[in-house]
Amino acid sequence: MEHKARVRFAPSPTGDLHVGNARTALFNWMFARREGGCFILRIEDTDESRSDSAYQTGLLEDLKWLGLDWDEGPDIGGAYGPYRQSERLDLYAAHLKKLMDADLAYPCYCTEEELEEERRTLILARRMPRYSGKCRNLSEKEREALAASGRKPSYRFKVPRTTIEFHDLIRGPMRFEGEAMGDFIIVRSNGMPAYNFAVVIDDHLMAISHVIRGEDHLSNTALQILLYRAFGFDEPVFAHHCLILGKDHAKLGKRHGSVSVGEFRKQGFLPEALLNYLGLLGSSFAGGREILSRDEMIGAFSLFRASKSGALFDEDKLRWLNAAYIRNASTDALLVRLEPFLRASGYRPETLDAVWLKNVLETVKGELTTLAEIGDHIDLFFDERYSPSQEARRLLAAPGAREVVGAFGAYLNRAQGDAAEIYAAAIRHAKEKSGARGKDLFMPVRAALTGKIKGPELDKVFVILGKESAVKRLKRAEQEIIKA
């Protein structure tokens, strides 16, 4: 086995990339980069009924979008390929033969119905549901008869009645009793390898040094260690991180809302923000910081600081992080990322003045928590989209609002010169004439100018709108007050 750390992320192309799996990929990637090792991408596509090439394409795209790169994989090759399990079937067949020749595995002719009945009986008897082993000691004649009847066998590993112990880098000493497991399937009746069988062979042949994955694989690890020992393979180092949980402390699933990388991508989350947040879940970075670049995350990552307890997924915290990344992004870079979201909101960026659009974005980006919100925040700069909200109408109808808006508008009608100076002077005039202060002064002006009761700094909004647009809107606002 090589001395250089070699880790892998091995998703199944049976669905979209779940944020929990993305975090597993991230932990493996950070470990490899910190240790100067190799990060390998392997596709576990032996479930023919559920695997889909479209999902595989999506998995790779989402990983790349997050900024995770790999050193070996199905798209770039490598010295230990192929990197799709469906292309490694001859290797699994050869290793099954080794176990059969050593009398460590046997064919099982039980049907699914028989196995289910056996399981039901054990549960009713309040016993642990595990395979009874009834095919383990069939004679050759009995096996031939079952095969002749048309039954296709699966193959099971003969589990020794022994204790399996290993040290987990995150969880410490672990212990499982082989007696409680039952002989498990290593090759299905359709000839496809079962998960635990294929994983052991692949990890060994690919010289994987560390297996970093979720705690839901702990019971699998015990089975895999039995196979490592049966083959005489060196065992990798295991590290099982905690799972991501919903607010109800159950494993994060669709009932909790968005759970896939693709969903967050479509909603306008930045890859840096999502990656940063996933890195915080179940891991404390050195220094206790929360906003870190990829390189900073690599430098601060350690499996020894990984949590054993479940990590709660807090979308509000993710939105806070995303908003911080948006605020800190350069306007030019942000404009490129915003283009599809602008189009989805009905805008054509190529028809808008570039300098004007940059000024608008500079003004509103502090209000955004996701890129998808851009339409709701820039519509206030378009006169044709100006339409006071219900909240704005109520505010404009409040006592004193008409006097504030009227005084502000009266000054605008006769003002000339720089827009910023006009705004400041108009506010002073409205204050003097109405006697309003604080929110009683600024909120009616905001409602009249933007049609909203919240938004970016009003002086900056006014400069972009200009006097002419502001005057038109004030007249419209006065009409709203009269209607009210």
Image: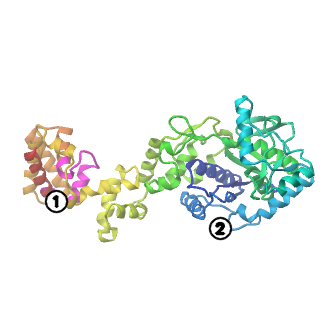
**Horizontal and vertical percent position of residue 36:** 71, 56
The residue wearing badge 1 is: 469
Q: Is residue 392 above or below residue 40?
A: above
Q: Nearer the viewer, residue 182 or 233?
A: 182
Type of secondary structure dominating the magenta stretch:
helix
User: Which residue is drawn at the image coordinates 32% and 68% (left, top)?
Assistant: 348
**Horizontal and vertical percent position of residue 282:** 60, 40
Q: Quadrant of the N terminus?
A: bottom right
Q: Is residue 460 magenta?
A: yes
Location of residue 443 (image quadrant): top left
**Horizontal and vertical percent position of residue 225:** 81, 45
The three-letter code of the residue at mark 1 reads Ser
Specify the color scheme.
rainbow
For mark 2, does the 10 Å Cα neighbourhood hold few (<14), some (14 to 19), or many (20 or more) residues? few
Q: Nearer the viewer, residue 134 or 202?
A: 134
Q: CA distance from mark 2 to mark 1?
A: 54 Å
Magenta stretch, residue numbers: 447-471
The three-letter code of the residue at mark 2 reads Asp
Q: Is residue 426 magenta?
A: no
Of marks 2 and 1, the one in the foreground: 2
- The label on residue 479 is none
**Horizontal and vertical percent position of residue 384:** 20, 61
The residue wearing badge 2 is: 75
Residue at the far top in the pictured view: 126
Q: Is residue 169 visible?
A: no
